[in-house]
Amino acid sequence: MSGLDLKGLSTRPAQVWGGVRLVPLVRDEPITDLRLDARIYGGHGLVEVDERTEYFSYIPHGFVASWGYSDSPTAAYGTQLRAVGEPDRPFDCIPVRAHRRMARRAGTKRLRFLPLHLALEGYLALHFGGPEIVWEEWSYRAVAQGLSPRVEEAYVGAAVNGLAEALQVFEIHHGQCGVLVYVADTLAAAFAVPHPADYRALHTTLVNDLYGELIYHYGVLSMPLQDFEAALDGTRVRSLADLRAQAREQHDAWVRFHDGVMADHLLDGRYTHETVYDLGPYRLSRLLPSFELRRENHLAETITDASGTLAYLKTFRLSSNQVRRGRLLTALAASSWNLTDTAAALSLSLPRLVARLESAGFGHLLRQDVLDHYRSRARRESAGG
């Protein structure tokens, strides 16, 4: 496991709108041999994962990554030619579209993938096959079907209170290639792209992305946030050079505070990396967190080069219930789905482990008589305690 490094990106002072704080991510040198544009789908979709599996989800848009140098010009989404006077064609309804796999070739040196779905697929498929050893406690369904189906809820960004308005009034910085979105000063999402032109074209797609239940409720309940204002010492300013020096001090102080405090859990978290696709000199990967309790856990998908420079980033904040489910599944798999060993690894009694499995929505994986037995033991332990 390793952390997440914003190599190639630096933060700038935040802007605030209501309960939403937006922190710009800027590149000193844009990446020119990898570009992203969007494919707008505008509705629900069926994704063919393989010949026997389909994935149904809300799919508002996809990204197409183009890499390598070419003699043909490169343009971001939104610059297609249209005949003079040709009307726009808004959707009359939300269509259902079929897509093949999460990441798929869209031509020579072009890859179409669904933003955030790569990361979410990694979470939903976590130990999806169920018990690898047929222990006597597991039901026939657990052995035959595994964890199918896995269901998690999310909210579209347009439903997060204040996000759409914040993106409308947000001032895009020179060289900006990304943004960190905070709702009620909780990190909701990180987004980064290779080039400033890509970011300008994709800035508004943040309202079409998926956000967790926690972020939605924070948006509903949050109060207006306090902005961080620069405090310059006028007694130390005698020239423009003094003013520039103080401005640099304020900027450096903001970066230290943000990276060391506000984004600490995202950057210092431990992630399991899985490569999904090689894009020439770049690598498309998804990251699963360590599922540690009482801290932020983020799913992520990235595109990096051989030196580790981050070309693309998109994250999803898990709720505490989603973290607990991931932690339970990871512990079960590490113990080969043996309940006794899993309980010891988590420092729990067997009845308490079974109670947690049931509360996490995995009770159906256990035989009914086993479930009833441990429920009875749990009640006796509670009465005796």
Image: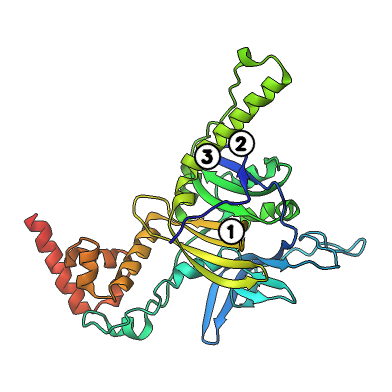
Q: Position of residue 34 (x, y in %)?
A: 71, 62
Work out how far the residue at label 3 is from the one at label 2, CA to CA, in angstroms.
Answer: 9 Å
In this view, 258 is above or below 300: above
Residue type, mark 1 in image:
Gly
Say which of 339 and 99 sits in front: 339
C-alpha separation, residue under disc 3 versus residue under disc 1 = 21 Å
Q: How many marks?
A: 3
Circles 3 and 2: CB distance less than 8 Å? no
> In which image quadrant can residue 16 be found?
top right
**Closer-to-camera residue (185/173):** 173
Residue that badge 3 annotates: 258
Report the Cα–Cα distance between label 1 and label 2.
25 Å
- At 56% from the left edge and 72% from the top edge, which residue is drawn? 276
Residue 250, placed above or below residue 345:
above
From the image, tell me which residue sits under label 1: 308
Near mark 1 (Cα within 10 A), the count class, few <14, some 14-19 or many ≥20, is some
Precedes in sequence: disc 3 or disc 2: 2
Q: Position of residue 24 (x, y in %)?
A: 63, 43
In this view, the residue farthest toward the left is 384
Q: Residue at x 46, y 48 (%)?
A: 217
Between disc 1 and disc 2, whose residue precedes?
2
Quadrant housing the C terminus: bottom left
Going by the numbered disc 3, the residue's amino acid type is: His
Q: Which label number is shown at residue 13?
A: 2
The answer to whether residue 192 is left or right of residue 382 is: right
Disc 1, SS: loop
Q: Residue reaching furthest front?
A: 307
Q: In the rendered image, which quarter contains the N terminus?
A: bottom left
Q: How is the image coloured?
A: rainbow
